[in-house]
């Protein structure tokens, strides 16, 4: 699928490269690379921190400005990446209590929700629209709300479709999901919890739209629970129902998992198996097309022995933070036939690719610009795929809101009237064509589109990437 995807970009618009440091002869500066250019880097020292950890992103719905949200030992950093080669460190929201290496961030309705394993930390809520008016960066920010329903928490998960946040690995419900209604972001409140599966380290929560019609429309929790995967129907927060508890061989620490876009497969990383069993980086793939009868579909082994951490699926690619070997992208276009293929990478820890906890803690690959955030012991690193540095994708004249989108999409222009909109799939086939009568805003029904990546061409000139979820 990758070759088709790149061909489509090439046929729509000409390429030109503007990356600050191209990947040449296997390196960008001193970073080993293949297929990614280095856009920019901000060190931990520049953000007045000693440790780096998680990351997420926010795109301002008003003007399309992209911001990186980076977890630090002593707080959360906010970085304006609208100029990816010259990012602006806007400042930091300090930790609610003490410093610790563990911090996690997610976003809902233009607010950041932040948890930490610092004692008594609870959940911080920060209004991200405040980043529009930072006059003298870097600023020290204050939280806009605080939820004290738990103390230390390892992780936070948000289902943006329903407006619920799930603290996991905290001191309530045996470390299982602590379910918080955040539909009014500044007034979060507890709605339920689930303890039967034990401690949850990380999770993904979706409104189920996969092949198992028994669960269509249900809110389903896919938890990584130390030694197994716990799958729970949490539609009724006061009465969660276990669907499955799934184990696998050579288990050390069931760390994090992510579903493929078609919901047929679940890709799982075990954080400790490289240490205990001498494996190269292993991804365990479950067939979850029938949630009541889950099977191990295959195991994928990387070319290095580094420890896998967080991974995310977009279309036919698996974007994996691989600690000492950095961001690794795996082609999963033939996963049905038990084939996964190493693709491209960018290594923020050049010293080695051994099993250790140095390097890439997290990657955030969901920005429309296709800039990818890498966070961890190297601070903040921004990369972009070589050959995709296209002028049309940098245009801020048009914005896709929201993106990712599900049923409805609005195309907003800052000043250029919209005359024509075309949407193409990755095969280059035109799926939608609309004339918009030279309006500055146009709403489009995209409920007929399948989950995946599309290209939206506006006025036969500007092309932007759309993710349909």
Image: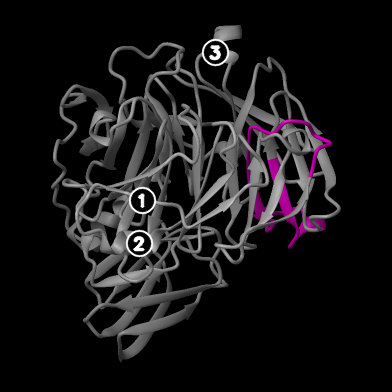
Q: Nearer the viewer, mark 2 or mark 3?
A: 2
Q: What residue is shown at x 61% (from left), y 39% (from top)?
A: 336
Region of the chain picked out in magenta, as a range: 194-222
Q: Which residue is mark 1?
A: 141
Q: Local crowd at mark 3 within 10 Å, few (<14), some, or many (≥20)?
A: many
Which comes sooner in the sequence, label 1 or label 3? 1
| Quarter of the rendering occupied by the C terminus | bottom right
210 in the magenta segment: yes
Q: What residue is shown at x 59% (from left), y 66% (from top)?
A: 184
Which comes sooner in the sequence, label 2 or label 3? 2
Q: What residue is shown at x 49% (from left), y 35% (from top)?
A: 103
Eyeballing the image, is 104 above or below 457?
Answer: above
Residue 162 visible? The answer is: yes
Q: What residue is shown at x 14% (from left), y 36% (from top)?
A: 21
Q: Local crowd at mark 2 within 10 Å, few (<14), some, or many (≥20)?
A: few
Q: Which residue is mark 2?
A: 130
Q: Nearer the viewer, residue 393 or 159?
A: 159
- Residue 362 x, y percent position in the rendering: 44, 34
- Residue 459 x, y percent position in the rendering: 25, 78
Q: Are marks 2 and 3 in contact (CB under 8 Å)?
A: no
Which comes sooner in the sequence, label 2 or label 1? 2
Eyeballing the image, is 363 above or below 394?
Answer: above
Q: Which residue is mark 3?
A: 274
Q: Nearer the viewer, mark 2 or mark 1?
A: 1
Q: Local crowd at mark 1 within 10 Å, few (<14), some, or many (≥20)?
A: some
């Amino acid at each position: 699928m990758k070759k088709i995807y790149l061909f489509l970009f090439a046929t729509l618009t000409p390429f030109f490269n503007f990356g600050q440091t191209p990947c040449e002869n296997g390196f960008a500066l001193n970073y080993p690379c293949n297929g990614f250019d280095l856009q920019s880097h901000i060190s931990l020292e520049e953000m007045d921190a000693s440790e780096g950890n998680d990351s997420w992103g926010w795109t301002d719905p008003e003007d399309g400005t992209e911001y990186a949200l980076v977890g630090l030992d002593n707080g959360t950093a906010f970085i304006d990446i609208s100029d990816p080669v010259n990012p602006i460190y806007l400042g930091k929201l300090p930790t609610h209590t003490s410093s610790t290496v563990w911090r996690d961030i997610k976003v809902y309705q233009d607010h950041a929700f932040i948890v930490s394993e610092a004692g008594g930390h609870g959940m911080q809520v920060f209004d991200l629209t405040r980043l529009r008016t930072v006059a003298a960066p870097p600023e020290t920010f204050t939280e806009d709300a605080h939820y004290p329903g738990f103390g230390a928490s390892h992780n936070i998960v948000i289902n943006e479709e329903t407006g619920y946040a799930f603290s996991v690995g905290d001191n309530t419900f045996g470390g299982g999901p602590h379910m918080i209604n955040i539909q009014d972001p500044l007034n979060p409140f507890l709605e339920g919890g689930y303890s039967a599966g034990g401690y949850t380290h990380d999770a993904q929560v979706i409104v189920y739209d996969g092949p198992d019609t028994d669960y269509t429309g249900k809110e389903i929790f896919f938890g990584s629970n130390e030694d197994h995967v716990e799958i729970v129907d949490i539609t009724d927060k006061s009465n969660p129902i276990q669907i499955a508890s799934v184990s696998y061989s050579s288990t050390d620490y069931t760390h994090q998992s992510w579903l493929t876009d078609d919901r047929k497969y679940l890709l799982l990383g075990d954080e400790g198996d490289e240490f205990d069993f001498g494996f190269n980086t292993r991804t365990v793939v479950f067939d979850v097309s029938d949630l009541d009868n889950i099977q191990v579909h295959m195991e994928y082994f990387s070319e290095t022995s580094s420890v896998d951490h967080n991974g995310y699926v977009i279309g036919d690619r698996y974007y994996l933070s691989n600690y000492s070997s950095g961001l690794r992208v795996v082609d999963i276009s033939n996963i049905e036939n038990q084939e996964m293929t190493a693709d491209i990478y960018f290594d923020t820890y050049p010293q080695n690719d051994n099993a250790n906890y140095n390097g890439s803690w997290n990657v955030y690959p969901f920005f429309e610009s296709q800039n990818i955030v890498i966070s961890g012991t190297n601070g903040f690193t921004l990369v972009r795929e070589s050959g995709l540095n296209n002028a049309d994708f940098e245009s801020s004249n048009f914005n896709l809101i929201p993106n990712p989108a599900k049923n409805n999409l609005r195309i907003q222009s800052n000043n250029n009237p919209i005359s024509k909109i075309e949407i193409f799939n990755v095969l280059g086939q035109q799926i939608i064509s609309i004339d918009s009568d030279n309006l500055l805003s146009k709403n489009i029904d995209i409920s007929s589109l399948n989950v995946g990546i599309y290209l939206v061409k506006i006025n036969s000139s500007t092309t932007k990437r759309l993710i349909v979820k």
